Image (spheres, rainbow, N blue to C red):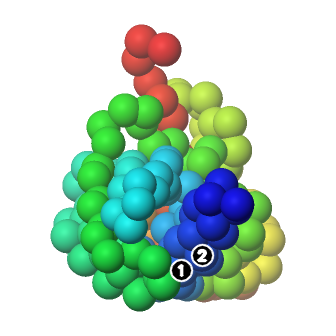
Amino acid sequence: MIETEHESLLESIHGVLKTVTDPEIDSVSVLDLGMVENVEVEGSSAKVSVLPTFTGCPALDIIQRDIVNAVIEVEGVDEVEVSFLSNPIWTTDRITELGKSQLKEFGIAPPPANHNPGEPWEIPCPYCGSVFTTMENLFGPTACRCILYCKSCKNPFEAMKPVANIGDE
Ligand SMILES: [Zn+2]
């Protein structure tokens, strides 16, 4: 019975985390971005472990605040702690299928799955699906995104850079 309460509390927390979004991409939840590594509940205190998407993204304070504000609203939770983990490393492969389609709706081409670093990176246009695109600017608005230009439908669009776990793994 206690176990059931515990699980429904965890479920409620996951439910509200679906409403917390990256302030820069406000159509995709932190869950669908694959940022939430772990949720723990002990008594009435919740602990959410989050993987920062890109070290360069300045939105982490806002994400932390938003997670606290959302989770504290869950009945049975009195205390929320958010910690950012540096391990495991977040990779774009963690983005869910739903997250990828939401990125696309937002006009951001989702990163390719299982991209091997160093390989040419082909990005289909989120508007027309053409792969006849050029990279305009490697360093778009943030370090995580870049601006591309579609030669088929003539739309500029943004793409998330593939981030792979490079190194000793
Ligand atoms: Zn296009």
For the view shown, which residue lies furthest in the front direction? Answer: 1
Q: Give the quarter of the image for residue 154.
A: bottom right
Going by the image, does 162 lie left or right of 109?
left
Question: Which of label 1 and label 2 is nearer to you?
Answer: 2
Q: Nearer the viewer, residue 92 or 10?
A: 10
Which mark is drawn over residue 16? 1
Q: How many numbered discs, if any?
A: 2
Residue 98 as seen in the image, left or right of residue 48? right
* Residue sitting at x 27%, y 61%: 81
In percent of the image, x 52 and y 28: which residue is there? Answer: 118
Q: Nearer the viewer, residue 164 or 12?
A: 12
Where is 111 relative to 166, above or below? below
- The three-letter amino acid code for the residue at tag 1 is Val
Residue ID for mark 2? 12
Query: Which amino acid, by three-letter code, is at mark 2?
Result: Ser
Position of residue 131 measured from the top left corner of the image (x, y, whole percent) = 74, 61
Mark 1, residues whose alpha carbon is within 10 Å: few (<14), some, or many (≥20)? some
